[in-house]
């Protein structure tokens, strides 16, 4: 179905954050270079365009060399071959000659690149040979790399800048996928909702929308190509329906459901159930404090990098972490060490392309493999610890051995510094770590259950994929047995254990969490009051094993 001009069109998607909103669309498109500068050149212009093209080629070659070294070192020489092949293409005299000829004939550099490479790419793509087809996609990749340099864009999302665009005003943002870096690019002032093509209920898009308290729907194929910027939509995050250009009747029927922003009500802490806040950037501490959070139970520090659009150095990290720790005035802040990779890529790191990134170079593995990334963070946190105690939490831990390696690396990286009290903790997100829970909990200072990833890896169900989203939920007895085992192990070891995945914010499970002995959770600040209300009503129960 397509959204026909002027007529109401309905799309069914996956509801990932509740609420109903009526607003105009702001479209974010991945930079596809589909609005490239195109102009005629002659005389000196020809030399200038050739020089631009030559410079772009040099930069891309340098980037390919860097990629080749990184991938050779991290994965292996065979996997790095793709970059060698791309470099050879870029140095190919015939190809280069054709691009120069196109400029001689009056094309600007951008047009010379697309004209030449598109021609080859479509010829190769038609041949019935897998190897040759791959070369065609290498050409497409090369084109993107050259245009990225020429147009000075990194592969990020850009508003298509249509004259009707609602950027900056009240708007629903429509995009293919709301990755963490895109999310951090979007100004949340006036942001009323999200529509995405990809992303399950536990995706970062969903987490962000719920944290902002705005409706979101995902899983609507190709939607970003079907709605022009500025089109009015009725977005229903309760049912997953998106109505494009709603009729007067549709709007009046929906009027009573449309969500109006409500002031947040503060609920004071309740007994026996500690409710902390999840934050992505230090600035969010303010709301956490307003909502009387009893700590920051998850500071997703990688989002500071996404917000900045690049890796932060030690000083920059120190300032942010110190401001968060100071603002919390002695309440704990669990600084999760950078959890980059898979659904949270950071372009600048030139991470290798992997067939299965969720099981690849990410989280704890990436920290161990990239001391250049871990060292500044460890040192920034050690500096904060001189003033306030610091909780360091390692993501995606697979077991005791990996925890020891990370803690050892942290201590080695900060050995020459004066440090204060540093607690080392882990996240339970990988089943193997849960199998080793007793040993781990006896050794760590604290731990937190990351139920978003734990469900993903326990049941082999992608948290980010709207197609399998119905299977990504905690309603399996075996999952609750796992939580109960973790909680029992923590009790036995006398180690604080909390839960910071989205499950903690869903009040239908609060009773069950308390029943299996979980006494501390961390949720987005907007959810704190609801969770406290639910906890206050939860039946007091002893810590008993379920029988099913
Ligand atoms: C989790 O996996 O449950 C978690 C809290 O971490 P994130 O959502 O950032 O992966
Ligand atoms: Mg996680």
Image: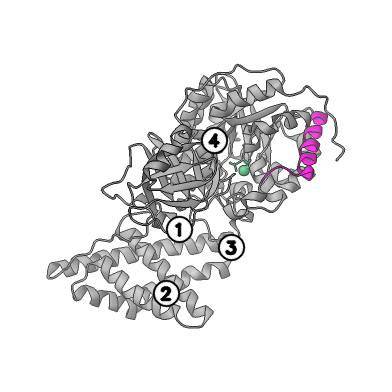
Q: Which mark is residue 355?
A: 3
Identify the residue position indicated by label 2 in the image. 88
The answer to whether the residues at label 1 and label 4 have Cβ atoms under 8 Å apart is: no
The number of numbered discs placed on residues in the rendered structure image is 4
Q: Alpha-carbon distance for marks 3 and 1? A: 23 Å
* Residue at 72% from the left image edge and 26% from the top image edge: 519
**Distance from the alpha carbon under mark 2 to that under mark 1:** 35 Å
Vertical placement of 524 versus 103: above or below? above
Task: Name the N-terminal-most of marks 3 and 2.
Answer: 2
Q: Is 62 above or below relative to 518?
A: below
* Most frequent secondary structure within the magenta stretch: helix
Residue lying at the far right of the rendered structure:
547
Assess whether mark 2 and mark 3 are in contact (beta carbons under 8 angstroms). Answer: no
Please tell me whether mark 2 or mark 1 is closer to you in this view: 1
Distance of mark 3 from mark 2, alpha carbons?
24 Å
Disc 4 to disc 2, C-alpha distance: 41 Å
Nearer-N-terminus badge (2/1) = 2
In space, the residues marked 3 and 4 are separated at their CA atoms by 33 Å
Q: Is residue 30 magenta?
A: no
Residue numbers of the magenta segment: 473-493
Q: Position of residue 133 (x, y in %)?
A: 48, 77
* SS category of the residue bearing label 4: helix
Q: Quick one: 524 or 92, which is closer to the camera? A: 524
Q: Quadrant of ligand 1?
A: top right
Question: Dot 4 corresponds to which residue?
Answer: 379
Say what secondary structure mark 1 lies in: loop
Mark closer to the chain start, 3 or 4: 3
Q: Which mark is residue 222?
A: 1
Q: Secondary structure at mark 2?
A: helix
Where residue 174 appears, as percent x and y from the top left, is: 42, 48
């Amino acid at each position: 179905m397509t959204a026909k001009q002027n007529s109401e069109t309905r799309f069914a998607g996956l509801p990932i954050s509740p609420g109903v909103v009526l607003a105009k669309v702001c479209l974010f498109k991945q930079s596809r270079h589909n609005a490239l500068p195109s102009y005629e050149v002659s005389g000196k212009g020809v030399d200038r365009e050739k020089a631009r093209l030559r410079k772009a080629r040099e930069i891309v070659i340098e980037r390919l060399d860097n990629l080749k070294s990184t991938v050779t070192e991290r994965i292996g020489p065979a996997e790095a071959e793709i970059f060698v092949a791309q470099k050879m293409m870029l140095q190919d005299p015939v190809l280069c000659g054709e691009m120069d000829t196109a400029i001689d004939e009056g094309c600007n550099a951008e047009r010379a690149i697309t004209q030449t490479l598109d021609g080859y790419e479509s010829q190769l793509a038609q041949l019935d040979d897998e190897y040759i087809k791959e070369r065609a996609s290498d050409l497409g990749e090369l084109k993107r790399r050259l245009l990225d340099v020429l147009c000075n864009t990194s592969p990020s999302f850009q508003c298509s800048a249509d004259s009707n665009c609602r950027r900056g005003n009240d708007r629903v943002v429509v995009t293919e996928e709301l990755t963490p870096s895109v999310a951090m690019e979007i100004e949340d002032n006036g942001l009323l909702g999200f529509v995405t093509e990809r992303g399950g209920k536990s995706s970062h898009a969903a987490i962000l929308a719920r944290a902002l308290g705005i409706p979101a729907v995902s899983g609507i194929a190709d939607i970003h190509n079907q709605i022009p910027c500025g089109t009015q939509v009725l977005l229903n995050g309760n049912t997953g329906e998106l109505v494009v250009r709603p009729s007067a009747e549709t709007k009046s029927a929906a009027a009573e459901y449309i969500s109006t922003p409500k002031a947040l009500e503060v609920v004071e802490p309740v007994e026996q159930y500690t409710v902390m806040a999840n934050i992505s950037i230090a600035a969010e501490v303010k709301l956490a404090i307003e909502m009387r959070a009893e700590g920051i139970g998850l500071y997703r520090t990688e989002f500071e990098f996404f917000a900045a659009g690049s890796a932060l150095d030690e000083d920059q990290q120190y300032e942010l972490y110190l401001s968060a720790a100071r603002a919390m005035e002695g309440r704990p802040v669990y600084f999760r060490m950078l959890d980059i990779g898979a659904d949270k890529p950071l372009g600048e790191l030139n991470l290798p392309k992997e067939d299965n990134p969720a099981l690849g170079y990410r989280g704890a593995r990436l920290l161990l493999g990239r001391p250049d990334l871990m060292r500044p963070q460890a040192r920034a946190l050690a500096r904060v610890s001189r003033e306030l105690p610091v909780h360091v939490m390692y993501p995606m831990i697979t077991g005791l051995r990996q925890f020891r390696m990370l803690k050892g690396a942290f201590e080695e990286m900060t050995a020459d510094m004066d440090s204060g009290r540093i607690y080392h903790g882990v996240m339970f997100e990988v089943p193997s770590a849960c199998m080793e829970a007793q040993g781990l909990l006896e050794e760590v200072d604290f731990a937190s259950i990351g139920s978003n990833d734990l469900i993903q890896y326990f049941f082999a169900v992608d948290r980010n994929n709207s197609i399998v989203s119905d299977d990504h939920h905690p309603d399996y007895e075996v999952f609750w047995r796992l939580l109960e085992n973790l909680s029992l192990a923590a009790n036995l070891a006398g180690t604080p254990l909390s839960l910071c995945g989205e499950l903690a914010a869903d009040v239908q499970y609060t009773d069950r969490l308390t029943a299996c002995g979980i006494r501390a959770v961390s949720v987005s600040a907007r959810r704190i009051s609801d969770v406290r209300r639910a906890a206050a009503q939860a039946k007091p129960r002893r810590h008993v094993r379920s029988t099913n």
